[in-house]
Image (spheres, rainbow, N blue to C red):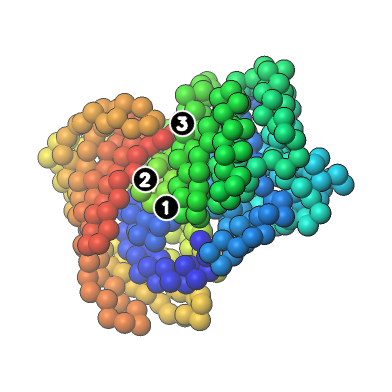
Amino acid sequence: MSTTDSKRRLPSVLLVGCAITAVCLIVIVATIAAFFIVRGRGGKAAEPTIEYILDTSPRMESLSNGDTRIRVARGIMAEIVRTADPRLTAGLRVFGTGAQPQGCQDTDLVVPFATANQGKIEGQLGGLESDPNSDSPVAQAMIAAIKDMASTEGPHSMVVVTGGADSCNPEAAELIRQEAEKAKIELRVFVVGFEVPQDELEAVKALVELIPGATYVDAPEAASLRDVLFRIQVEVDQMVTEAVEAEPSERTAATACDHPYMPLRTGATWSYAGNEGSQTWSITSANGSANTATATMDIAAPSVDMTSHWTCDPSGINSYDFGNLSVLDFGDVAKMDVIDSSGTWLPSAENLTPGYSWNNDYTTVISVSAGGISLDITTTSSETWTVSGVEMVVVPAGTFDALRIDGTTTTTISGMMVSTPAFSASQSYWFAEGVGIVRYTTQTEGYSDNSELTAYSVP
């Protein structure tokens, strides 16, 4: 997201970022196109592996809608990588930065493989620059990536973002094919051509056609690059779900936050995909007893980070509070405090029978300080929820018999610099026992979303 876009959308964060309880907060953050994402826990030693490869050669310094292609590409790749399933073993390789003195050998593994490596990759992407003396050794980078992955157990994926054809070796495709054969690894290759010049397009496609298990996707502008990489990441994340078996573990005694329909357990993660992008939630801690307990959820999205805190007792998951809201281009922009609440967010499982209804009311104060704005905004929200019944839900993470809960929320806002009318939203959530939310939808004036579970891990 550009600084200009963030400034334009920041008021939406402040307007709705504090209006609804944590699950409804997902809807609110979605209004600013930034859903919950978390950096999670590692997995087993043998895991799906992905290597990202970015073209940083001099040709990427050409302009793309007012900015250089390399800046656009590395920004979009960072957005996508940080939302990836944390169980992936991931690494980042580049070509064209001048790391090697010979231009046609100039490729470098800037982030070695590790589990839950997305933060390091995102950080490295931000500092990449082209070397004016380098060539564009696409094949050399891909061959090196195969060698990188040969020592790890699969399945493996390679995602290459390139601005054109290989400039070094006319036998590039054959060399890649030979290396893949020698490595004897399960490998899928995605080559994404970002604004590839017309005179190089056929050469890139021809290279990809000769590589077993490779797919070429054209991305003629930034929006399509983001969409393509998002779809590839969803597919790779699904591979994680299919490949990683649940590890047996000794469970400690359940706390009151370990709800049958929303198990807030330390280490639990959920990943989703919807029309606003991908997202993941992670429980970093859950402590207490069966009578009273607390849980902390780290939440983030491309350009947005937040933390929520929960309290639970035998009546269900009750109250909640939020920490700081952080936006990539601004840092911490708001502190949110729930100053008054009544009702329950999710009642105990024995009450969740078809036809059961309940209310949930709360008042939140957002203290804002960003972009020259400094003010306190108060939001008061009133929710009504009803259990509609059990439905079979098919989502990327599997097929579930899910409890459907429908609700409406009315929110009033005071403290804004302009008068803001009350607004209402309608939501539906599908909860699978032992899993959590497998689908959720929301609709308000001018906005709607439908997000589905793509992967989860509940210890």
Percent across and percent down for residue 85 are 52, 38
Res 455 seen here: yes
**Front residue of 95 and 367:** 95
In the figure, 174 relative to 410: above or below? above
The residue that label 3 is drawn on is 238
**Front residue of 295 and 215:** 215
Question: Which residue is depicted at the point 47% across and 67% down?
Answer: 5
Which numbered marker is on residue 158? none
Percent across and percent down for residue 204 are 60, 38
Mark 1–mark 2 Cα distance, whole angstroms, equals 9 Å
The reply to whether dot 1 and dot 2 touch (C-beta < 8 Å) is yes
Mark 3–mark 2 Cα distance, whole angstroms, equals 14 Å
The residue that label 2 is drawn on is 274
In the figure, 211 relative to 95: above or below? above
Question: Which residue is depicted at the point 55% across and 52% down?
Answer: 195
The residue that label 1 is drawn on is 35
Q: Secondary structure at mark 2?
A: strand
Q: Secondary structure at mark 1?
A: loop
Q: Secondary structure at mark 3?
A: helix
Disc 3 or 2, which lies upstream in sequence? 3
Percent across and percent down for residue 399 are 31, 26
Residue type at mark 1 is Phe
Residue type at mark 3 is Gln
